Image: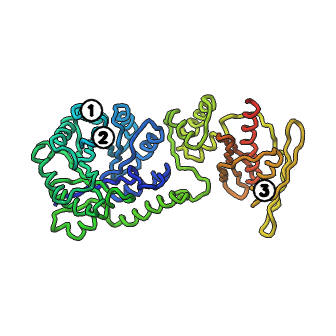
Amino acid sequence: MKTIHLTDCTLRLPAQGQTAPGFREKIEIIKELDRLCIDAVELNILSANKAHKLLLKTAAPLLQNAALCCRCENDAAAIAACGEAMKEAKRARIQLAFPTSTVQMVYLGGAKPAQLLAKISALVTEAAKVCKEVEFVAQDATRSEEEFLVAAIDAALNSGATIISLSDSAGTLLPEEIAALISRLYEKLPGLKNATLGFACSEKMHMASACMIAAAKAGATLFKTAVSGEELPKPNAITDTLQLRGDSLGLKCDVNCTVLAQTENKITSMLCARQSGLSAAAPVAGEQAEILLQNGDDAATVAACVKQLGYDLTEEDMAHVYESFCRVARKKAVSSKELDAIVASTALQVAPTYRLKSYMINSGNVMSASAQIEVEKDGKLLQGISLGDGPIDAAFRAVEGIVGHHYDLDDFQIQSVTEGREAVGEALVKLRWEGKLYGGRGISTDIIGASIRAYLSALNKIVYEEAAE
């Protein structure tokens, strides 16, 4: 009995009009897909964007069943970077896609047939040097001149490709036409039997299930699916068919059908929450997309994460942040919140313009919260009084009244540093001013006091830079 393998392209091909998932959502989706025991999780094209490398590096050790597959830009530098980012993966796969139809070759590839064949050979060879699994994708294969398609596949096979995937981009072929095309390719390419043949069947005519069965009977064993999306069929387009007719067809699938529906619902919920502006994976208001840095991560990786959090630091401040990160990372992994705290307590340390002298807060369920704040500036005591929607809001409004300016509160986090009834609380405040983010950190056994100190810490950095200008 032949086994059918599925790859999932949800993260590579987001649905039209769908908001792209954030870093944390992508990690959670990757974990969920791995539970399905699919053959591979396909990710977006790797570019010079450091966030792409960070995603690959974070996802690599998480996958236990599926391969981590990344479609690279068609250049040697991207291939090398991709191989390096995925080196911790149990199974890594580099995917290279080339247009093979005349229309796409000219308008998308910008190359003539001879040039494209040379490029395929050169880049597949480079990919084979850094990764055991190399996938060559013939885009728009079903509209290609068959002679050139054969030549392109042959070039990829001779250069080290282990997987050949054909794409029905137009979505116009019927099941019997797909089967006939695959049969002819096996006849003309003897070496194809030593590679895995994949096929991306379109769902445009709502015949993906029949097309996959026809392709499988002709020799294909790998199919592209997407739990969420419109271009490709969902995994159950083939699994449902095989559950009913697999024995008679001599086909079975390695997907864990027991958790398939549950996984699809979870991923769809994450993407829908992202579309509506919420975060299914991060229910706490203001929580950042999750980051997990390890001891040994270089300065460039840490800088990319700091930028992802929204900070724009000078080289000097970034050097101080990296030094502090290294001290913490020797003991444990560093998450988004911990990196936030490192930036807030390390970057742009300035002499305080405003010092907290006293505060008095009144709050209850039958009264509006009020705050009376007293700060010192240049030896003078300044006082602010304000009402607010809760004690923290009242306190921040009172500080704004003293300063005479409103700053956008980009993020506010509180957490316990120690345990017990006398626990020390830590607050992190991020203020945005003229498009730039400033972080402040405060610690106290009184969480309101910690919050006011954190606000003043961020405020003092803004005042310092304004004076410097």
Crowd around label 2: few <14 · some 14–19 · many ≥20 (10 Å) = many
Which SS class for mark 1?
helix
Looking at the picture, how far across and down is residue 347, in whole percent? 65, 35
Tell me the kind of residue under disc 3.
Ala
Rounded to the nearest angstrom, the CA distance separating label 1 from label 2 is 11 Å
Label 2 sits on residue:
96
Rounded to the nearest angstrom, the CA distance separating label 3 from label 1 is 64 Å
Label 1 sits on residue:
119
Task: Check whether the beta carbons of the residues at disc 1 and disc 2 lie within 8 A of each other.
Answer: no
Which dot marks residue 394? 3
Residue at coordinates 59% horizontally, 53% vertically from top-left?
Answer: 287
Which dot marks residue 109? none
Tell me the kind of residue under disc 2.
Leu
Which SS class for mark 3?
helix
Looking at the picture, how far across and down is residue 68, in whole percent? 35, 47
Does residue 133 appear anywhere in the picture?
no
Q: Which of labels 3 and 2 is toward the front?
A: 2
Q: Earlier in the sequence, mark 3 or mark 2?
A: 2
Relative to the observer, which residue lies in front, 321 or 145? 145
Q: How is the image coloured?
A: rainbow
Left of 226 or right of it: where is 152? left
Does residue 285 appear anywhere in the picture?
yes
Which SS class for mark 2?
strand
